[in-house]
Image (cartoon, rainbow, N blue to C red):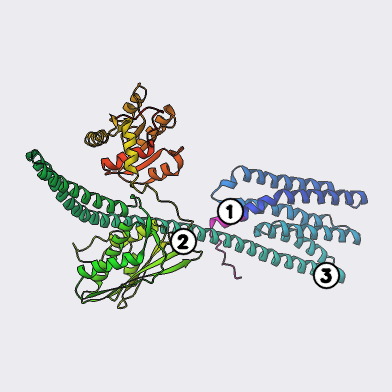
Amino acid sequence: MRLPQVRETEPWIRAERVAAAFRQAPAGVAATVVNAALMTAVLVAAGHDLRAPAWFGAVLAAAALRLGVWRAYRRRGAASDRPGRWGAANACATAAAGLLWGGGAAWLWPASESYRLFWVFVVGGMCMGTATLHHAHLPTALAFILLAGVPVAVRLAADGTGQSLAGAAMIAVFLAVMAVSSVRSSAHFGETLGLRLDLARRTRELNAAEARLLAEMAERRATEESLRHAQKMEAVGQLAGGIAHDFNNILQAVSGGAALIRRRARDPAAVERLAGMVADAARRGESVTRRLLAFARRGELRAEALDLGELLGGLREVLAATLHPGVRVEVQAPRGLPAVLADRGQLETALVNLAVNARDAMPDGGTLMLSASAAHAGSGGGRDRPPPGAHVRLVVADTGTGMDAATLARACEPFFTTKARGRGTGLGLAMARSFAEGSGGALAIDSAPGSGTRVSIWLPTAGDPALPAPLLPAGADAERGAVRGGAAARRAGVLLVDDEPTVRAVLAQELAEEGFDVVDAADGAAALALLDRPVPIDLLVSDLAMPGMDGVALIREARRRCPGLPAILLTGYAGEAAAMAVGGALDRDGTFALLRKPVTGAALADQVAALLGPAPPPPPGQAAVE
């Protein structure tokens, strides 16, 4: 790998070279002092020269100088922004040590050949050690090598003999090799530092680029979220306008009917007819809220076993009469299809919405095919695939214009529509997917420009043991009337809690007319106060959403005071609280039910009677009395 060129102008590299030289200074000083002591001892013991102790003292002085420079660097130089000056000081101190070794050899040059070889050996070892220790800072290494080695070579050459000249030449070659090696080692050290510096710089640049990218992504997400919110608000505004129009019509019918009932209170036939009109208007309002809650996935699905062949056959007649005259409606449903477990009303609504989308995709007419077939899903279900188990696959296919990939990717997004303004809200496919997934199945779309569209809905079969039971009671049956009569006959006491005065008054009056003794309260605290009084209360009816203590908390506290007290929870939507209640948070002993508003007095009375059970038989020999 080719290393980057070293830029010696980088302050960081120069400072690191000087620091590396000073890190090795104590080892170099120790080696110099130990070798000088051994050399002096050898010379003095041999009696060759009594000047050796003076030379040793000079070596100690040079060593002290080097240690003094080293200590000063550690105190101040390591943090200095001028590493060049400290490097020069260290090189000068090391050069003094080298000059003492080279000059000492020339000054103390012994007459004996063996001692001369000893000098050469020691000086050569000192030069090799210095080259190894101080290769990072080339001036320090070269200062010692040259000033220690060159005087020895010169002194050896001065003898004039052939052997001395050959030895001097060998020392010169040895010094040249060490100098070249030191230069290369120092260059490699600098290249390594340059690589580290370049890597650190690139890492910082990558981190900065990553930070900028993350900031841009966050800004883009915020912008997209703001755009989606703005589009959703526009669609919600359009939707709210349509809902307001529907509810104004309903309120008009209700308020107008109530006013007419007041005026014609003495005309039973007119009152009955007008009351029927008001009830119809209320049912239309209930239908609107049920569809809205289904879209928001806050409404419960009243699952029942459905014969798809019969359902599709009846739907074909309705669609054939209401869609575009050029649209031919066909149904393919083989006999023997297993029944599916789904909410009939929401399934019909989903199919009608898909049929309307198909009609709009075929402005010049075409074929709308409704088909059903048995299917079994294996493992690996996803958003557009059903969970494992037995299913029936419903397919709504048209021969219309189809959708491109971009439109298909957003087709099920709430409020997304390609229709002209005022012709659609973008809720049809979203509601259909919500219904399919809420029923334990899935929805998938297959479409291409010019090839029409196929919408597949998988619904679980009614016989699948893995399916959950329906969330809420299925409703009153023929036996409820007899049970209700038995409960009313013994004048069961009902505590009704609702924070809406009008709702509370109407429900209390309806229960009273069904034969129950009703006491009412506006909130949880008032209800608990009534429970503490000697008032006969056999069952508690509470709204879910109330200020302060909600219905779930109220039922829990009431059962703590009156263990086993039957309870009914009323709610405008069946969401998390309903799932929690049915899942076991309240239903400890089978005396709990959940009903969705609006609820009729008869339905509420039926549920009260079902929880209270039939009246006990009279004692032997005693007849029951009204």
- The residue furthest top is 534
Q: Would you say 160 lies left or right of 378 here?
A: right
The residue lying at 70 percent from left, 54 percent from top is 95
In the foreground, 181 or 275: 275
- Place of residue 530 in the rendered image (x, y in percent of width and height, measured from the top left): 33, 25
Q: Residues within 10 Å of mark 1 (few under 14, many from 20)?
A: many
Quadrant assignment, res 223: bottom left
**107 or 520: nearer the eye?**
520
Q: CA distance from mark 3 to mark 2?
A: 97 Å
Q: Are marks 3 and 2 in contact (CB under 8 Å)?
A: no
Number of the front mark, 3 or 1: 1
What's under tag 3, amino acid-wise? Leu
At x 58% / y 51%, what residue is drawn?
85
350 relative to 87, above or below: below
Q: Quadrant of the N terminus?
A: bottom right
Which region shows up in magenta? 1-16
Give the mark toward the camera: 3 or 2. Answer: 2
Taking the magenta stretch, the answer to whether it contains residue 531 is no
State which quarter of the image contains the C terminus.
top left
Residue that extends furthest to the front in the rendered view of this protein: 621
Looking at the image, residue 289 lies above or below residue 606 = below
Which label sits on residue 15? 1
Disc on the earlier residue, 3 or 2? 3
Q: Quick one: which residue is furthest to the left in this view?
A: 263
Identified by mark 2, the residue type is Pro
**Residue identified by numbered label 2:** 387
Q: Which residue is more in the foreground, 453 or 133?
A: 453
